[in-house]
């Protein structure tokens, strides 16, 4: 078997499976915030707990994908998730400090099993649909 075909037939699918499994492990186990619109709670009363997911969105007013993402970010915020929208033109230092080189850039904080209770992991993406998927999966 040639090295290139081995990479395509074995290594890449394995990396995909392990990445998917890692995301699944990261997403499992967080309680939704009380009154979340992403969760249908019948007659159950949820004990008040702090939101476990936080979203930092680095955007710019001149950026079309950023403007398209803002209604989704507003929906996520209305569901009880802590969302902070940071305009890179107004706060260039915040963008520099977080290594943001293009917009939109999203950082999503989710609980991590590594490090015990109260540990978090930050995921980085430039795709708002991944942010929405992470939030929905966390609040199912």
Image: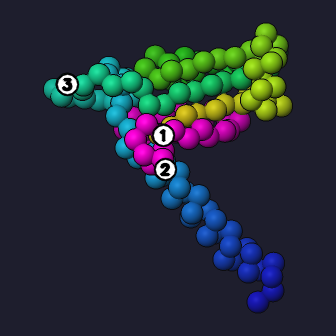
Q: Nearer the viewer, residue 138 or 99?
A: 99
Q: Quadrant of residue 108?
A: top right
Q: Which residues are magenta?
A: 112-140
Residue 131: quarter of image: top right
CB under 8 Å between callouts 3 and 2? no
Quadrant holding the C terminus:
top left
Residue nearest the viewer, comparing 118 with 135: 118
Residue at label 1? 119
Judged from the image, the secondary structure of the residue bearing numbered disc 2 is loop
Marked residue nearer the N-terminal end (3 or 2) = 3
Q: Position of residue 25 (x, y in %)?
A: 46, 52
Q: Residue at x 24, y 25 (%)?
A: 47
Query: Split into 4 quadrants, where in the image is the N terminus?
Result: bottom right
Q: In the drawing, does residue 96 fall left or right of residue 25?
A: right
Q: Which residue is mark 2?
A: 114
Q: Is residue 75 visible?
A: no
* Residue situated furthest bottom in the rendering: 1
| Residue 3 as seen in the image, left or right of residue 136 | right
Question: x, y (%) of residue 38?
Answer: 39, 28
Question: Compared to 5, does 82 lie above or below?
Answer: above
As measured in the structure, the alpha-carbon distance from the residue carrying label 3 to the one carrying label 1 is 25 Å
Q: Secondary structure at mark 1?
A: loop
Q: Position of residue 18 (x, y in %)?
A: 57, 63
Mark 2 and mark 1: Cα distance apart in space: 7 Å
Residue 43 in the image: x percent, y percent? 16, 26
Q: Which mark is residue 107?
A: none
| Labels 3 and 1 touching (C-beta < 8 A) | no
Residue found 36% across the figure and 30% down from its top: 32
Q: Are marks 2 and 1 in contact (CB under 8 Å)?
A: yes
Residue at 73%, 81% in the rendered image: 6
């Amino acid at each position: 078997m040639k090295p290139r075909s081995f990479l395509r037939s074995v290594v890449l699918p394995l990396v995909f499976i392990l990445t998917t499994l890692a995301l699944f492990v990261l997403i499992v186990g967080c309680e939704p915030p009380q009154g979340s619109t992403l969760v249908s709670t019948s007659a159950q009363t949820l004990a008040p707990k702090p939101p476990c997911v936080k979203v930092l969105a680095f955007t710019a007013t001149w950026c079309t994908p950023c403007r398209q993402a803002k209604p989704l970010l507003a929906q996520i915020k209305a569901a009880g998730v802590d969302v902070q929208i940071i305009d890179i033109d107004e706060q260039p230092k915040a963008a520099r400090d977080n290594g943001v080189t293009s917009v939109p850039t999203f950082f999503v904080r989710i609980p991590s099993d590594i490090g015990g209770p109260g540990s978090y992991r930050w995921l980085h993406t430039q795709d708002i649909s991944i942010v929405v998927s992470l939030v929905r999966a966390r609040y199912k």
